[in-house]
């Protein structure tokens, strides 16, 4: 049987998600609820609609074709133009409105795909992978949230000698991780607040299993690059940086490097999904600050 998963994007020619030129496959569904999540369209496992107001021509097509009557128009005091509103509790994610919209204002985020269909897409870029020593990265959402689909996709890539990376929060059962670990050529492993209570406050879950899973990957000898989202006032504090350096120093012989991922504002994405952004307005960290912390962690963890 060809395993089926739900993805929300396939990004070709990526150069930031592992070595070489890569294709990044974004899987839907995540057990964390990070307040700063940069891919909110990947949080929930089911397909959902995004609305791009600037593309809307107020033609009314979406409201007419919606089988659930979940879309209606409200002028909101603007006499010259009305915009559609979506009652998301009625929406089934069928995508009929997105298919019918002549301007592309509605976009269905999330579609079912078999491993065979995915491999057919990935094989188009095999020459690029070979020439650049690149490959495929499975991201999300949380790719371990769909363990069966991820397992068979990794297995199919391995059979074709395509390099694979798994970009993960590390929040999964040890059994799932043990099943996936031998098939992935690289793990991009996210670490967020080191303090457990702070981790719960900002992500909704404990970080104990995350830390244990990272230790397990190191014990198994799997290649790991640790990635840290640099969130002002949360993960870039002196307390958190010191705790992070101390934790990674214990594992320094088992990790290949530490990458810092600077915060950027994605409030607009949440608006398009009909959600409220859970973070206050923050400024992107200055390049000097990012470089300073990167150098400091390199010295503290690897002695360089």
Image (tube, rainbow, N blue to C red):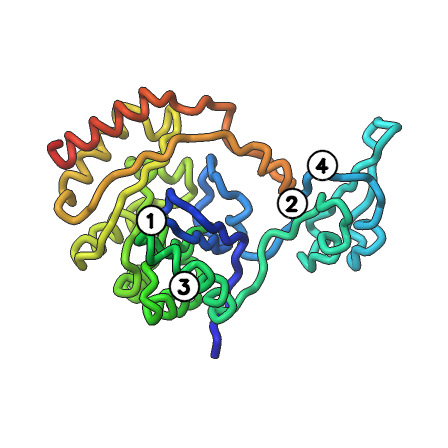
Q: CA distance from mark 4 to mark 3?
A: 34 Å
Q: Residue at x 56, y 64 (%)?
A: 112
Left or right: residue 178 versus residue 263 is left
Residue 231: x and y in percent read 39, 29
Q: Which mark is residue 226?
A: none
Residue 81: x and y in percent read 84, 32
Circle 3/circle 2 CB separation < 8 Å: no
Q: CA distance from mark 3 to mark 2?
A: 25 Å
Q: Which residue is mark 2?
A: 50
Q: Up-down: is 259 above or below 93?
A: above
Residue 93: x and y in percent read 67, 56
Element type at marker 2?
A: strand
Q: Which residue is mark 3?
A: 150
Q: Residues within 10 Å of mark 1 (few under 14, many from 20)?
A: many
Q: Earlier in the sequence, mark 1 or mark 4?
A: 1
Q: Residue at x 84, y 46 (%)?
A: 60
Whether residue 155 is visible to the viewer of this picture, yes or no, is: yes
Q: Residues within 10 Å of mark 4 (few under 14, many from 20)?
A: some
Image-quadrant location for residue 113: bottom right
Circle 1/circle 4 CB separation < 8 Å: no
Q: Earlier in the sequence, mark 4 or mark 3?
A: 4
Of residues 236 and 24, the one nearer the viewer is: 24
Q: CA distance from mark 1 to mark 3?
A: 21 Å
Whether residue 197 is visible to the viewer of this picture, yes or no, is: no
Q: Up-down: is 263 above or below 143?
A: above
Q: Residue furthest bottom?
A: 1
Circle 4/circle 3 CB separation < 8 Å: no
Q: Which mark is residue 20?
A: 1
Q: Earlier in the sequence, mark 1 or mark 3?
A: 1
Residue 217: x and y in percent read 22, 55
Q: CA distance from mark 2 to mark 1?
A: 31 Å
Of residues 260 and 45, the one nearer the viewer is: 260
């Amino acid at each position: 049987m060809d395993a089926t998963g739900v993805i929300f994007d396939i990004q070709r020619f990526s150069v930031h998600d592992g070595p070489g030129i890569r294709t990044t496959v974004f899987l839907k569904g995540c057990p964390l609820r990070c307040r700063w999540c940069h891919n909110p369209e990947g949080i929930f496992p089911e397909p959902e609609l995004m609305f791009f107001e600037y593309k809307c021509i107020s033609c009314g097509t979406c409201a007419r074709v919606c089988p659930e009557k979940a879309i209606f128009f409200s002028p909101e005091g603007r006499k010259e133009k009305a915009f559609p509103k979506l009652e998301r509790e009625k929406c089934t994610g069928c995508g009929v409105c997105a298919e019918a919209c002549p301007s592309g204002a509605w976009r269905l985020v999330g579609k079912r795909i078999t491993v065979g269909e995915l491999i057919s897409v990935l094989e188009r870029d095999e020459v690029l992978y070979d020439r650049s020593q690149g490959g495929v990265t499975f991201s999300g959402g949380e790719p371990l949230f769909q363990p069966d689909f991820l397992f068979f996709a990794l297995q199919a890539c391995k059979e074709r000698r395509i390099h694979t990376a798994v970009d993960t929060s590390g929040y999964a059962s040890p059994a799932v991780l043990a099943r996936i670990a031998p098939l992935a050529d690289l793990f991009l492993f996210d670490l967020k607040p080191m303090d457990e209570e702070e981790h719960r406050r900002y992500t909704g879950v404990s970080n104990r299993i995350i830390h244990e899973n990272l230790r397990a990957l190191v014990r198994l000898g799997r290649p790991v690059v640790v990635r840290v989202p640099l969130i002002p006032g949360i993960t870039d504090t002196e307390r958190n940086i010191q705790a992070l350096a101390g934790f990674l120093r214990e594992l320094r012989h088992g990790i290949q490097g530490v990458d810092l991922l600077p915060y950027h504002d994605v409030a607009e994405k949440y608006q398009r999904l009909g959600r409220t952004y859970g973070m206050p307005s923050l400024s992107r960290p200055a390049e000097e600050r990012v470089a300073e912390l990167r150098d400091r962690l390199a010295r503290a963890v690897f002695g360089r």
